[in-house]
Image: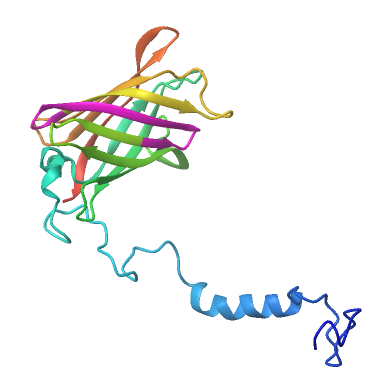
Amino acid sequence: MSDEANPRNEPAESGETHAPGKVDPNQAVDRAAEAAKQTAHKNVPDFEDIPIPADTANLRLGPNLHDGLLALLPLVGVWRGQGQAAHPGESEHTFGQQIVIAHDGENRLRYESRTWRMDDDGQPMSTPDRRETGFWRINDKDEIELIISHSDGMVEIMYGKPMTERAWELESASTMVTATGPAALGPGKRLYGLMPNNDLGWVDERLIDGEMVPWLSAQLHRVVG
């Protein structure tokens, strides 16, 4: 029925009582329930259901590694182990960590770090700790870019170069802290390296009160790749 035929937008003869252009709440609930029949049993996707290559942390599987990433090749994998944290304003504590460094065939590496608290006996607690996500990139001159978003309210860009074929050093070039982020945490320096036993070791130092001090470090063994 047009507005001319019904200038006051009166309810239609069908018994519809909601305002024109608005969704009937009952219909919205019914539609959501119908959609849930297809989605309620699913969780975070692994990208197998979209028409692009899935990320892989195993160089033997999935798309070929982009030629531009050869200087970062040893980092690709899933790494898991333990580390030590000395957060500003907090006591030192042990954490468990998993790092995923994966690729999709393009000239970038996806980076994701998840950590969890450990108790005094070295047993994992069901308490999620800090998270980081971002990307590694490297140019033709072997200049590395690492872009990281931190879960505690900080976004950071780090630059660096390979020190050897098994070690990489980066320094903060730009650090932005949110209003609720770690205001006392200054720019940092990170060193990643493969140890003689092929574990991945890494350390992060930060400028705190005018001095570079250890902040995070860990030793991780390869579980994928």
Q: Position of residue 30 (x, y in %)?
A: 67, 80
Asked if 20 appears above or below 151 in the picture, the reply is: below
Q: Which of 92 and 51 is in front in this view?
A: 51
Q: Which of 174 and 99 is in front in this view?
A: 174
Which quadrant of the figure has residue 96? top left
Q: Does the magenta stretch include residue 160?
A: yes
Most distant residue in the bottom direction: 13
Viewed as shown, does residue 98 lie left or right of 154?
A: left
Q: Where is residue 29 in the image (x, y as percent from the top left)?
A: 69, 76
Most distant residue in the front direction: 4
Chain part drawn in magenta:
148-167
Q: Can residue 204 be seen in this view?
A: no
Which quadrant of the figure has residue 60? bottom left
Tell how many labels.
0
Q: Looking at the image, which residue is at 49% across and 33% down?
A: 152
Magenta region, main secondary structure:
strand
Q: Where is residue 180 in the image (x, y as percent from the top left)?
A: 58, 29
Q: Looking at the image, which residue is at 30% across and 42% down?
A: 135
Q: Looking at the image, which residue is at 45% across and 64% down?
A: 43
Asked if 206 appears above or below 218 in the picture, the reply is: above
Which quadrant of the figure has residue 157? top left
Quarter of the picture holding the N terminus: bottom right
Q: Looking at the image, which residue is at 17% across and 54% down?
A: 58
Q: Can residue 205 be seen in this view?
A: yes
Q: Nearer the viewer, residue 120 or 89?
A: 89
Q: Is residue 8 magenta?
A: no
Most distant residue in the top direction: 210
Q: Position of residue 47 (x, y in %)?
A: 33, 64
Asked if 68 appears above or below 214 in the picture, the reply is: below
What scheme was used to colour the molecule? rainbow
